[in-house]
Amino acid sequence: MTKFNKDLSFDEKMKIVQKEVSEEKEYLNHLSFDPKPVIEIVKRYIDLWDPVLLLAMECPEDEYESEIRTISIYITKHMDDLDVIKLERQLREVFENTFEEVIVQDHRSIDTATRIHTAIRDLTK
């Protein structure tokens, strides 16, 4: 995910985001396996965590779609050496980049990373 230069216009930012989304979808479509189970696992635990409380404010269920896709891609690229500590750091980084606010490492972020890690490991057994 790109950190934006504050001087960019809204339209310029949208073009960058659309390009990133297109590239991410292209990557997922060309995997040698179906990434849907990974994405579903990530969605389940990100939605439970609700790191910026959007779902608590009754935002749409797909509110974290972009972040979930980015995290799922990270997982698919690191499947063989997936580590809870690095995953938790990645989770916070993705949300910090998107929402431009600090996501503190706490029991909820660690628990989310642990649950995702465990579910992915169970999936690949």
Image (tube, rainbow, N blue to C red):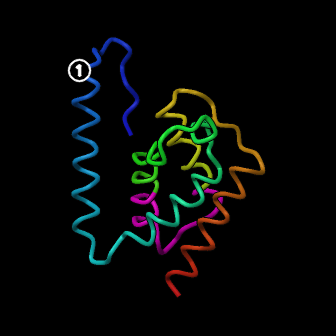
Q: Residue at x 57, y 78 (%)?
A: 121
Q: Residue at x 53, y 88 (%)?
A: 125
125 vs 85, left or right, is left
Which stretch is magenta?
Answer: 72-87
Prevalent SS, magenta region: helix
Q: Quadrant of the N terminus?
A: top left
The answer to which quarter of the image holds residue 35 is bottom left
SS label for mark 1? helix
Return the x and y of residue 10 as percentages of the image width and height. 29, 18
Return the x and y of residue 27 as percentages of the image width and height. 26, 60
Mark 1 neighbour class, 10 Å CA radius: few under 14, some 14 to 19, many 20 or more: few
Q: Residue at x 52, y 37 (%)?
A: 59
42 vs 32, left or right, is right
Return the x and y of residue 97 as percentages of the image width and height. 48, 34
Comparing 106 with 66, the one in front is: 66
Q: Is residue 2 magenta?
A: no
Report the amino acid beneath label 1.
Asp
Is 88 located above or below residue 13 in the figure?
below
User: How many marks overall?
Assistant: 1
Q: Residue at x 27, y 14 (%)?
A: 9
- From this viewpoint, which residue is outermost toward the right? 107
Is 42 located above or below residue 92 in the figure?
below
10 vs 102, left or right, is left
Return the x and y of residue 48 as percentages of the image width and height. 64, 54
The answer to which quarter of the image holds residue 54 is top right
* Residue corresponding to mark 1: 11
Comparing 85 with 70, the one in front is: 70
